[in-house]
């Protein structure tokens, strides 16, 4: 029997806490580890006598996550989401245990990569578990559970820097790795107790498994992105040639793969979707440039402690939690394009404000600028997600969603390279202003893109699930 609006709402509210709580704990680990490291880079650099190369602590996790999210999603489809969720938690615990004993920066980067692989399992496997429950109870849109996971991620991003700052102040930088253990253990215990086991795995040959994962495509993607990051960080322009060759090889392979890691044909055919991924990547270049660059300057250029810089940066993510709610309402009434224009305008204003900042700027002014730079976190983030749902074909919505997350982490890696060239090399006022100028140029591009689309499209009210 088809569900009425009332019964559907009741079903949404019935998403059991016994399912949501362990999934929330497991999925927030990725956001928590992404954000806490922002206030630990200075301390880790001092420990290992490292300079701009500490950005690989950020890039290593994001490279692993950019590939790991869709890969873990495929593994969840093949072997069962509960199994993959649990495997990810075990990987997190191993990485969190080994990282504090790293004898050098390279070993610590390797531990962060392992941590990125483990935390990549949480989101796709968690969504798959919620979808499995929804199918069993006949609820096709379990927004209660999905919203809880999203809100947990936003909160982890918001409170990661202040939490990391306090931990570093009291226990040192190693504590930001130890904190994973109680969260992962709690999630593991609750999943084992409360979440129904997966069914038997369908038999398939090892060759079929490998082909479905598209390991060559994944490796080509990592090689191309790594070569580009190295080219930007080291100014070795021969690596740009390697980047181009890797990209050409990636496209050539993906056009022939039966289950491509990146569906090139879909991206070429659906230009609106491709533009959404581009906006997403550029947006997160800007977001992570602020999120990691500002604490670096606050500690080295402004002379704040890790805990103080974490509190100053808190509005960047904290305001994003609030503006997500506002953006959701505006999208229903005005459409996606005005929301993207507002968010891009806030990025431009915040970038321009950073040009006026110096080492003696009052803290209250810095907090206000951080709040302005937090507005796009909700507007552009939710706007791009809604645009993706509006233009992605229903038949490939899972793949399209995974690629949106990949675009986010590609942007994060590009932000790491940008920081290495600017504020990572000299965390003073001049470095901050160089970063702000580049951010301003990118913000102008995003704003112009949104205004042109708004002028052409008028009042568009794309909504979630609007794809064909």
Image (tube, rainbow, N blue to C red):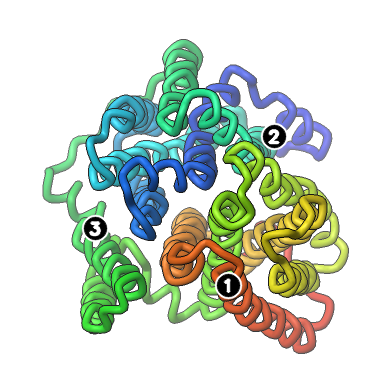
Closer to the camera: disc 1 or disc 3?
A: 1
374 over 105 or under it: above or below:
below
Of 288 and 78, the residue lying toward us: 288
38 over 171 or under it: above or below:
below
Q: For mark 2, does the 10 Å Cα neighbourhood hold few (<14), some (14 to 19), or many (20 or more) residues? A: some
Q: For mark 1, does the 10 Å Cα neighbourhood hold few (<14), some (14 to 19), or many (20 or more) residues? A: some
Q: Quadrant of the N terminus?
A: top right
> Where residue 430 is drawn, which disc sits there?
1
> Where residue 141 is drawn, which disc sits there?
none
Could you tell me which residue is drawn at 77 percent across and 54 percent down?
371
Is residue 280 found left or right of 185 in the rendered image? right
CA separation in Å, label 3 and label 2: 33 Å
- The answer to whether mark 3 and mark 2 are in CB contact below 8 A is no
- The tag earlier along the polypeptide, 1 or 3, is 3
Is residue 258 found left or right of 282 in the rendered image? left
Q: Which residue is mark 2?
A: 144
75 over 98 or under it: above or below:
below
Could you tell me which residue is drawn at 25 percent across and 53 percent down?
212
Q: Which residue is mark 3?
A: 214
Element type at mark 3: loop
CA separation in Å, label 1 and label 3: 44 Å
Image x and y of residue 238, in percent: 22, 83
Closer to the camera: disc 1 or disc 2?
A: 1
Q: For mark 3, does the 10 Å Cα neighbourhood hold few (<14), some (14 to 19), or many (20 or more) residues? A: some
- The answer to whether mark 1 and mark 3 are in CB contact below 8 A is no
Element type at mark 1: helix
Residue 110 visible, this orientation: yes
Residue 139 visible, this orientation: no
- The tag earlier along the polypeptide, 1 or 2, is 2
């Amino acid at each position: 029997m088809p569900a009425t609006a009332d019964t559907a709402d009741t079903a949404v509210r019935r998403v059991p806490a016994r399912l949501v709580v362990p999934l929330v704990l497991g999925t927030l680990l990725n956001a928590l580890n992404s954000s806490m490291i922002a206030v630990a880079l200075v301390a880790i650099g001092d420990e290992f006598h490292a300079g701009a190369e500490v950005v690989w602590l950020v890039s290593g996790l994001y490279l692993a996550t950019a590939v790991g999210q869709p890969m873990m999603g495929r593994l969840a489809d093949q072997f069962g989401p509960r199994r993959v969720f649990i495997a990810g938690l075990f990987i997190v615990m191993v990485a969190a245990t080994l990282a504090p004993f790293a004898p050098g920066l390279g070993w610590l980067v390797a531990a962060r990569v392992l941590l990125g692989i483990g935390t990549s399992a949480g989101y796709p496997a968690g969504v798959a578990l919620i979808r499995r429950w929804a199918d069993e109870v006949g609820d096709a849109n379990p927004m209660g559970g999905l919203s809880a996971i999203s809100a947990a991620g936003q909160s982890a991003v918001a409170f990661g820097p202040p939490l990391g700052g306090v931990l570093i102040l009291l226990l040192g930088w190693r504590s930001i790795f130890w904190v994973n253990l109680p969260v992962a253990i709690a999630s593991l215990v609750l999943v084992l107790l409360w979440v129904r086991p997966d069914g038997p795995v369908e038999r398939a040959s090892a060759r079929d498994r490998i082909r479905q994962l598209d390991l060559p495509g994944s490796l080509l993607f990592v090689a191309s992105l790594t070569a580009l990051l190295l080219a930007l960080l080291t100014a070795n322009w021969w690596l740009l040639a390697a980047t181009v060759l890797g990209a050409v090889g990636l496209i050539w392979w993906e056009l022939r793969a039966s289950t491509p890691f990146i569906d090139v044909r879909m991206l070429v055919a659906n230009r609106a979707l491709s533009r959404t991924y581009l906006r997403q990547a550029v947006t997160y270049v800007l977001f992570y440039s602020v999120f990691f660059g500002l604490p670096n300057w606050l500690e080295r250029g402004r002379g704040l402690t890790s805990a103080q810089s974490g509190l100053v940066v808190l509005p960047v993510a904290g305001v994003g939690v609030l503006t997500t709610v506002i953006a959701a309402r505006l999208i229903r009434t005005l459409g996606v394009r005005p929301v993207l224009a507002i968010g891009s305008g806030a990025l431009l204003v915040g970038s321009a404000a950073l040009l006026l900042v110096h080492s003696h700027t009052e803290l209250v002014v810095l907090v206000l600028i951080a709040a302005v730079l937090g507005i796009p976190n909700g507007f552009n983030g939710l706007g791009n997600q809604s645009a993706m749902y509006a233009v992605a074909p229903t038949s490939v919505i899972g793949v399209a969603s995974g690629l949106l997350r990949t675009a986010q982490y590609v942007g994060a890696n590009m932000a790491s390279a940008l920081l290495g060239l600017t504020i990572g090399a000299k965390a003073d006022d001049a470095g901050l202003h160089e970063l702000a100028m580049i951010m301003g140029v990118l913000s102008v591009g995003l704003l112009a893109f949104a205004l042109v689309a708004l002028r052409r499209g008028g009042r568009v009210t794309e909504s979630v699930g609007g794809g064909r």
